[in-house]
Amino acid sequence: MEDVFVESDLVLLKRTVKSFVAEQVAVLEQSQKDYLQKLPVEQVELLKEKARMAGLFALGAKEEWGGAGLSLFIRSVIYEEAAKHRLGLYHPAADAFGEELPSFLEQCTLEQIETYVKPAIERGKGCFMALWEALEDNHIERLRCEAVKQGADWVINGHKSYIQKLEQSSFGIILVNCLGDNGAKEATLFILAPTDSYELKETVLMDVQTRHEVILKDVRLPDDRRIGKVGEGAQLIKQWLAETQVLLGARCLGVAEKALQYARDYAMLRITRGKALIEFPAVQTMIAEAVLNIKAARLMVYDAAKQIDAGDKDGRISAKMAKLFATEAAAKIIDDSLQICGGSGYAGDLPIERWYKEIRLARVDLQKKETILEEIVKMNR
Amino acid sequence: MFNFMESENQQRMLAEATEIMDKYVYPNEKYMLPHRGLPYHILKPLQEIVKEKGLWAAHLPREVGGMGEGYVSLGLLSEVMGQSPIGPLVFGSMAPDAGNGEILLHAATDEQKEPYLYPLASGEVRSCFAMTEPEVSGSDPTTLQGKAVKDGDEWVINATKWYTTGAVGASFCIAMVVTDPDADKHRRTSLFIVETDNPGFELVREVPVLGDHSPGGHCEVRFNDCRIPEKNMLGHRGDGFKLAQLRLGPGRITHAMRWLGVARRALNEMIAYSLDKKVGDKSLADSQTVQNMIADSEAEIQAARLLTLQAAWKMDQGDEARKEVSLIKLYGANVLNHVLDRAIETLGLYGLTPSVLLEGLYREARAARIYDGADEVHRMVVARQVLKEFKAREQWQI
């Protein structure tokens, strides 16, 4: 679809998303009486209907599966806009556009697509990723969860932690090491169905985000749940990681811009020692650096997205760099905005308080700075 | 004269405090409740143990049941108790009661001390301090708007305040309001003791905030034609700014002292995790990247510690130590946030789970760069003072 997309279409699309967020999502958020942690499910479902009517649905999913088939670049533009509200960093447009699905699902068999993928898209649901483990949330090659072949089935044992958006998913995907006869460990992806006999535990990260742990004790999965070949899992998951890093970066841009907007508005109004805060160079510096870093981060996010769309071999490392730069930039901007707004920034009346927690999470999520720096060096020595 | 050794008395005090922390404080952290501290039935026996050991209320003199050992001792002790969010509560030097105790000690009449200072000092009651207003900048208390008007032998207060910390469960409040709008900007306000069961005192809401370690929340309160007797004025008419500053000076340094403990706790969590976590056949602590973070944290904590103790020492000599207090308020708050950030970075997502204390400390710590003067205000104070000293030294001609 992207080949027919010209710039004016993109501007129009961006405008549509902007007004959807302002008129539907932000209004709904503001109508909630108490300190907002999440929107009621039934209202989110209504929003999904409205988004579908506006053509904003299943943005990345292939057209033959019922999706919009938009490129990662176009989705980056959309999600930056869609993140500009209180819940936007992790729930862009309040999840009204449906959940993002990994592009590696095209490796699924026709039966898998009919059974899992298409129904998920139809319902605006996603698939959760059971990837990281309690003490390993950075290096894919250090993961431990294992599968052993028994007849036609795989028997899986292990724990998977920090699973995001499990409640918004209609199925899951798990990365396990398949043990070969010679003792080799081959990372492989399998589909987890809601009916499988894994155990679930809930936890809340940074007092703001619900995540789940999946505990698998001798869980039997038939071989037809496998996605791709045995041993292809790590490559496929890295592809997903790159797409997800770019989209997180895009959402960071939106939230950073929104935080900057609150800070600027506040600084224009608040008088201290006889003048508005915006007159103080300390505040001006924060605002100027925010504008500068948003611009730089946006260029990196767009660049990574375009590389991945083009199948460029540098796409993955660019995605990591974009994720790192955008999360760090947004963190600094949110921190400065909180500082400018002072007590109002520290209070949950403004969304900065929520973003402060979420952005700390985002910085360690999907590979932290130190891991990404290691990978950049690997590519450059 | 330089001596970095603790006295024998201080060594004994620290050893006893450490023992109490290990035996009674850390094991009870699991009972902590957001915005409520420890449940009463758990807290009270712990406070009794502290009192028996003579470590209660280190910020207050002996005549009101405190330790009376001066600021350096208070600093050393705060560093120990600050390692747990419930430490100051158990040791009787929790904000805002500690600051209110100091203000009452200084400004209250004997008639006021009896019902307010003594029960506060012994931990029988809690209190709150109502100064900050949502409508005006907290960085400039000369702009406060809430006012009290004299009516016969009563004062009638009308004001909206927020960040009145600890208002839930407080038995009285010290309110700072304008009594003389036309006076010089530092003489406009006065302080009043307002009992929280006064029908004119309204607890509007607990403001939802980032951190949740303060018992009694950070509240919005309203004074609606709140009538209080003349005798509840604290100090003299127009003394509000002066007394609030008097409260904030020592208050800032007790915060800074406590932060040393919090930062130490965060560093310890980070070290313990990195020694424990294996990466292949090595531990994470073998990684140079992690070692850099440990070394930087240690350097910053040590620098903040010496700055703090030096300011405390100056205050013990009777100096206001204005520059030093501003320096440590600014530097200490940033060290605290840096160290916590590094600790979370080291632990990764695990560091954000409720099974480690770090995420709660991280959220709580952000306020330190705002309350009692934002970073930017203290930078200004420090810079002005440094410039002034330089000019005086060099006999600078403008």
Image (cartoon, rainbow, N blue to C red):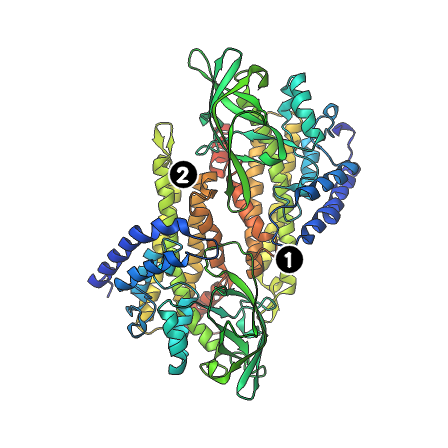
Outermost residue toward the left in this view: B8
Viewer-proximal residue among A47 and A138: A47
Q: Residue A248: name its quadrant.
A: top right
Residue A163 circle label: none
Q: Position of residue B294 (x, y in %)?
A: 37, 44
Query: Can I make out residue B242 in this image?
Result: yes
| Kind of residue indicated by mark 2 | Thr
Q: Is residue B338 above or below residue B225?
A: above
The quarter of the picture where residue B282 lies is top left
Circle 2 SS class:
helix
Give residue A264's mark. Answer: 1
Confirm whether residue A80 shows in the render. Answer: no
Q: Which mark is residue B289?
A: 2
Chain hosting mark 1 = A
The quarter of the image holding the N terminus of chain A is: top right
- Name the residue at 58% across, 33% down: A319
Q: Position of residue A145 (x, y in %)?
A: 46, 25
Mark 1: which amino acid?
A: Arg
Q: Is A206 rendered above or below residue A68? A: below
Front residue of A71/A314: it is A71
